[in-house]
Image: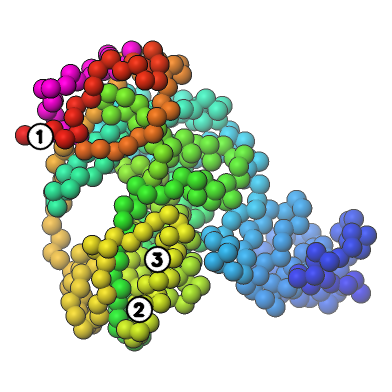
Amino acid sequence: MTRLVPVDDLEDVPMDETPAHPTRPDPEDLDVLDQLRSVPAVRTRPSVERVSRELQHRADPDRVAPRVEGRPRVQQGRDPQAQGMTHVTMPIADLPARVLAAQLPLTAAWEKVQSKTGMPGVDGVPVRRFASTVPASLRTLEHQLASAEYAPLPLRMVEMEKKNRGRRLLLVASVRDRIAQAAVAAWLGTKWNADFDRASFAYRPGLGVQSALRYIRELHESGFRWVFDADIRACFDSIDHGRLFHKLDTWLGTSSPMVGWIKAWVAAPVWDGADVTRLACGIPQGSPLSPLLANFYLDEFDRRLRAAGVKFVRYADDFLVLARTPFDIGPARQCAQDALRDLGLELNIEKTRTTSFDQWFRFLGAEIQGDVILLPFEKKKTPLSTVFVAPVMPPAMLRAWRKGHVRWDQPFVPRPQPRYTLDPTRPCITPGQAMLSRLAGPRHILGRRPSATSEGH
């Protein structure tokens, strides 16, 4: 009878004891294999290594044997805190760009972008104009992605005024780039969403606000009466590029063309109407890929809480930590703070408090008290008022950008823009002057930007 090696002892097996070719297993092993086999169409006899892996998996389902060379597998470690999100050891990094580009659902991505409309990017091409040349434009986009000729355009800076009189920074990509990002988000979403924690409800198919509220009710009925209501401060704008890129390299592989595309979209150039700078931190709000990347980045936070036995509900950057007694809230809060600190994030103290179901509190727009959850009446969302929109990039500067003549090594620093008014004490730099400035050198300033402190009217 052929000796079966336990999974934990595979590393201790001498090389000369490993058969060079698949050997015929024992009939007893084949009986077990026939019970485990779920695809009757497979007629080839399994190797001893495969029988060993399946026998071990049956005895210990939480552990999957390491991948045998030549067999793409998904490996998941025992310790979710150390391992993080399940990473794929299949050779995605070895897939050439032409294969990845052919797998992207560009047509479905275009339909999604078209349904949202949105404003044009720096090239000034609106959705309706792109729609007139969709078949040819999608073929060109797929060819550019497949031939490593793809290069995204700079993001167009837009500032919106929120209800609390604050400002929200949006970085708008061109229609072509939004289609590519939406296609990659759909491709990755089919692989990532199944691995995300079940307490994460934002930006996931089939889940939403009502799903999160139902889970809160289940926890309340299970005896969790105390709540730590928290918010992550500037989550999208504070995501560290180094940590995010490391996670992407671990999951996809450093040589994957898709990693190159995502890095180009995340660390993207920004056009503010006067200069082109580099986004050094955060992920662009307004990108079809950003919600998925935010969940991917925060998956480590979810797993840290899950490994510590903390009950929680997270919806994007808003989350609740629930406990049975007020004495359990303190350790749970500290666990959440430590997990966020390791990701370079922090709590928004102004929106954080400890309460209970006996008191009234609001989460995701719902009012919760005891076993009663009141949802507000659905009403049409009023669009945010626009405070600042960067002008379209001048054609000459756009041509220079596409030829690689525009430098953008300076980091982007978001600062409040005036409400379409100029500071009379300082000359405003024009788009033409900005183009000459970038072509002449990194800091040959021919004019000055409008003052960030000037008041709008």
Label 2: which residue? 329
At label 3, the amino acid type is Gln
Q: Which residues are magenta?
A: 417-436
Q: At which x and y percent is residue 295?
A: 42, 56
The residue at 47%/72% (across/down) is 306
Residue furthest toward the left? Answer: 457
The kind of secondary structure element at disc 3 is helix
Task: Tell me the residue at 62%/65% (across/down).
Answer: 77
Q: Residues within 10 Å of mark 1 (few under 14, many from 20)?
A: few
Residue 343 is at least partly visible in this image: yes
Distance, label 1 to label 2, CA atoms, is 45 Å
**In the rendered structure, which amino acid carries the disc numbered 2?**
Ile
Q: Amino acid at mark 1?
A: Gly
Taking the image as shown, residue 22 lies to the left or right of residue 130, namely: right
Q: Which class describes the residues within 10 Å of circle 3: few (<14), some (14-19), or many (20+)? A: some
Whether residue 193 appears in magenta in the rendering, the answer is no
Q: Is residue 433 magenta?
A: yes
Q: Residue shown at 86%/68% (left/top)?
A: 25
- Mark 2 nearby-residue class (10 Å; few <14, some 14–19, many ≥20): many
Label 1 element class: loop
Q: Are marks 1 and 2 in contact (CB under 8 Å)?
A: no
Labels 2 & 3 near each other (Cβ < 8 A): no
